[in-house]
Amino acid sequence: MYNMASTSCISVDDLTFKYDNNVIFKDLTFNVEFNNRYVLAGLNGCGKSTLLKIIGGKTIADYNKVKVLDKDPFRDTSLNKDLTIITNNWGTQTMAYSGYNMPLQSSLQVKEMMQAIKLEFPERNQELLNILDINPEWKLNSVSEGQRKRVQLYLSLIKPFRVCLLDEITVNLDLLVKDRFMNYLRRETEERACCVIYVTHIFDGLDEWATKLLYMRTDRSIEVSDMKDVVSLYPYLLTKFKEEREGITNNDEIEDGVYAASTRNAGGYSHGVLGNFCETLTK
């Protein structure tokens, strides 16, 4: 049973994670608190998407190292009712000799999708239709990429969440829709006991939106900052990125580790190899 008095909704404690022999995280520790909006930032290949997949229960981690609402996100599927993870893989499929993550071509209309959830939460359903400017008559095979993304966000958020993980999900939204959507997430975290972690490389407009910054360094550690202490997010992160990139260029040991990890996609359980996991199985 989750302790409702707790302010922490996500805890990562001494997490070590590998893909093959490439260490993605080593002894990673941090907490995420309710009623906050986190921006997760870092150089390409530092492990942001992998971390979201671990927190979102899409990739297994060592037992008791990651807790979401006091539960293991991979092993306890009851979290599915409270945790929402939104990535760029929705509505796509990989086809041999054709392409990777190709959009599904379906004549299914938006009004025909997830009807039971819509009936359960009619007010949220209508609010999201308005915010994301969605026509229920739309068909997946006749919408733009931006409209498809809006449908994905709509369907993913009709059910109220406690934890929402967003991975580069707003890149195709036009400015007006994005502004309404980000304000909606702000209201959600202010009015309900929930939190949002937002991975992005587009930092415009986030100074007032975000409450905290999770900065993932190339040494696989995380620096948690209150946005009140960050004067301006874009120049702040630009300086950080430049310093880290210069450090990588001048340090062969770090450079090898970063680029080795970057050559492999952030995969699921079939791709992920936990620290000491294979060794344990063979003993």
Image (cartoon, rainbow, N blue to C red):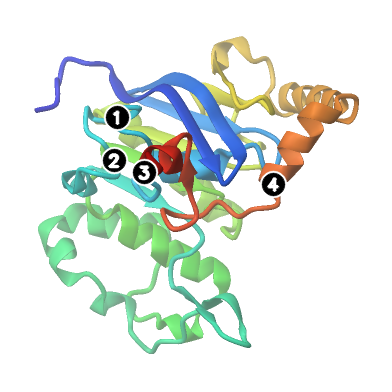
Residue 184 seen in this snapshot:
no
The reply to whether dot 2 and dot 1 touch (C-beta < 8 Å) is yes
Pointer 4 with pointer 2, Cβ within 8 A: no
Badge 4: residue crowd in 10 Å (few <14, some 14–19, many ≥20): some
Marked residue nearer the N-terminal end (3 or 1):
1
Q: Residue at x 48, y 70 (%)?
A: 148
Residue depicted at 60% across the width and 55% down the height: 265
> Where is residue 152, by image quadrant?
bottom left
Alpha carbons under labels 3 and 1: distance apart: 23 Å
SS at circle 4: helix
Question: Could you say which is closer to the camera, residue 135 or residue 49?
Answer: 49
Q: CA distance from mark 4 to mark 2?
A: 25 Å
Rendered-image quadrant of the C terminus: top left
Q: Which mark is residue 262?
A: 4
- Label of residue 73 in the image: 2
Question: On the image, numbered disc 3 is attached to which residue?
Answer: 281
The three-letter code of the residue at mark 2 reads Pro
Which numbered mark, 3 or 1, is in the foreground of this view?
Answer: 3
Check disc 1 and report the residue beneath it. Answer: 67
